[in-house]
Amino acid sequence: MPTFPLTDVSHDVWVESFTVDAAELGLGVTAPWSVNKRRLRGGRRDGVDLIVVDNGALRFSIVPTRGMGLWKGFYLGNYLGWESPITDGPVHPGLVNLAAIGGLGWLDGFDELMARCGLEHNGAPFQVKTAQPDGSERHTTFGLHGRIANIPASYVAVHVGADPPHEIVVEGRVEELRLFGPQVRMETRYTTVPGSNTLVLRDEFVNLKDQPGEIQVLYHWNFGPPFLEDGARFVAPIRTVTPRDARAQEGLGRHDTYGGPEPGFTEQVYFYELHAEPAGAPATLAMLRNQAGDKAVVLRFRTDQLPAFTLWKNTAGLRDGYVTGLEPGTNYPNPLPFEKARNRVVTLPPSGRYTAETTLEVLATAEEVAAVEAEIQRLQAHGAAIVNPRPTEPFAPQG
C-alpha cells in the first residue's frame, strides 16, 4: 500500500501541496479518483490545510487543522453539508476563542459536514466551582462541545491500496493534552473505495496518562438541502425518544419530520435510544431522507460504541443556518456533571483504547431509500417506540 506522509510533527515533516491519482499510480480502476492537499489563504481560513478526496462518485474535504473534521462533500452532484452563516470558513482554530460568549465560542468556527465534539466533554457549557485555601471560590467554565474540533493534527498521511478494491485512506492523529488534565490521542482513518457511495470513519482514542482517564465523544453530522427540506423525514429504529427541554417538547409530535426554512426558528433537540441487531455486533442506523424519498443520507454505527443518539433540528432561515444534526455519541450532549452522574463517561486505563466507527452512506435513488427504510422497519419490529412526553431521567434534566 503506497503511503504519502503529509504532516509528521515528530519528524518535522510538512507538505504544503500534494496530488495523487489513479493514473499516476498506474491502478486500473473503473472510477477515476484523486487526492489533493493544499493550504488555504486569506481571511479567517488563512493557514488552514484542506485535503480533498474524490473517489469518482463521492467527494469530501478533510480539515487536518480543525481536528481532522469533514468540511463539505458531494455525491453525484448532491451537496453534503449545510450553508452556515460562516461564509469565510473553514476558520483557523487560532481565531476561535472557545471561552467567549459564556463558553459558546465554539460556534464561531462551526460550518462542517462533520465536527467531533469532545474529548474532555462534549455537551453544553458548564461551570465548576472550586474552594480555595483562603476561603474564596475559583470558577472554571468549560465551553460548548469541547476542544477536539479546534486542535490541529500532528500527523497526516494518505494511503492507497495497491490491490483491489484500491481503498483510499486518509489517516490522522490529534492529541488533546493538558497538564493536570486530559492526555488523549485520537487516531483516525477515513476510508473510501473508488466509485462507492460510502465513507467509513474509524477513530481510536488512546489514554496517554499513567492513570485512568475519561473521554466523551459525539459525532456532529450536519445536513441541509437537498436532503433537508419541507417534508423531509428522520427515519430510525427508535426504542425511546425524549425531548431535551420545554422547547423540544413543543414539537415532540413532529420530532421525525421537518418544515421548510423558518426565520426565527429556535432549535429543538431530541435524545434517542435505538434498536440494534440483537446478535453479534449491535449494529444500527439512522437516515435523513428528502420529501420525495429519492435522496437520503444514512449513518451506520454500533450501539456498544456509540449508545446515545441525538437529533438536532435547526430549521431556521436559509441565511441563518437551515440544518439538522444526526449525532451518534457515547453520551447525550448535556453538561458533563449530569452525564457523569448517569455513567455516560468512558473510562480508559493507562494506555487503554476506545474505538468508534461510523459509516456515511449516500443514497440517490428511490429504490435505495426504500431498501434502507425496510431495513429500519425490520429493526423497529423489535419493539414499538416509547415516547417520553417531557424531559425525563436519565436522558435529560427534568424541568
Image (spheres, helix red, strand yellow):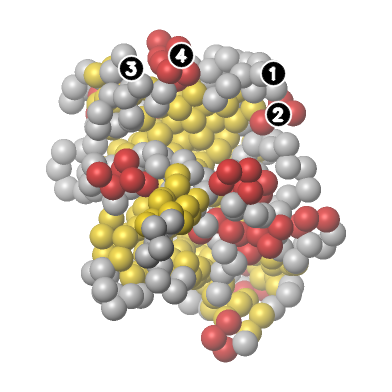
Question: Would you call the spot at circle 1 few (<14 residues within 10 Å), some (14-19), or many (20 or more)?
Answer: some
Is any atom of residue 59 visible in this view? no
Q: Residue furthest left?
A: 279
Q: Nearer the viewer, mark 3 or mark 2?
A: 3
Instruction: Estimate the spatial distance between the alpha carbons at disc 1 and disc 2, rounded to whole Å.
Output: 7 Å
Instruction: Estimate the spatial distance between the alpha carbons at disc 4 and disc 2, rounded to whole Å.
Output: 20 Å
Instruction: Estimate the spatial distance between the alpha carbons at disc 3 and disc 2, rounded to whole Å.
Output: 28 Å
SS state under label 1 = loop
Under mark 3, the amino acid is: Arg
Q: Is the residue under label 2 in contact with that under label 1 (CB below 8 Å)?
A: yes
The mark nearer the N terminus, 4 or 1, is 4
Residue 40 drawn above or below residue 91? below
The mark nearer the N terminus, 3 or 1, is 1
Q: Considering depth in this image, is 31 or 54 the residue closer to the camera?
A: 54
Under mark 2, the amino acid is: Asp
Q: Which mark is residue 390?
A: 3
Residue at 58% across, 43% down: 102
Location of mark 2 (residue): 320
Q: Is the residue under label 2 in contact with that under label 3 (CB below 8 Å)?
A: no
The mark nearer the N terminus, 4 or 2, is 4
Instruction: Estimate the spatial distance between the alpha carbons at disc 3 and disc 1, rounded to whole Å.
Output: 26 Å
Q: What is the count of numbered marks? A: 4
Location of mark 4 (residue): 251
Q: Which mark is residue 263?
A: 1
Under mark 4, the amino acid is: Gly
Q: Residue furthest bottom?
A: 11
Question: Would you call the spot at circle 4 few (<14 residues within 10 Å), some (14-19), or many (20 or more)?
Answer: some
Q: Residue furthest front?
A: 134
The mark nearer the N terminus, 3 or 2, is 2
Residue at 56% across, 69% down: 153
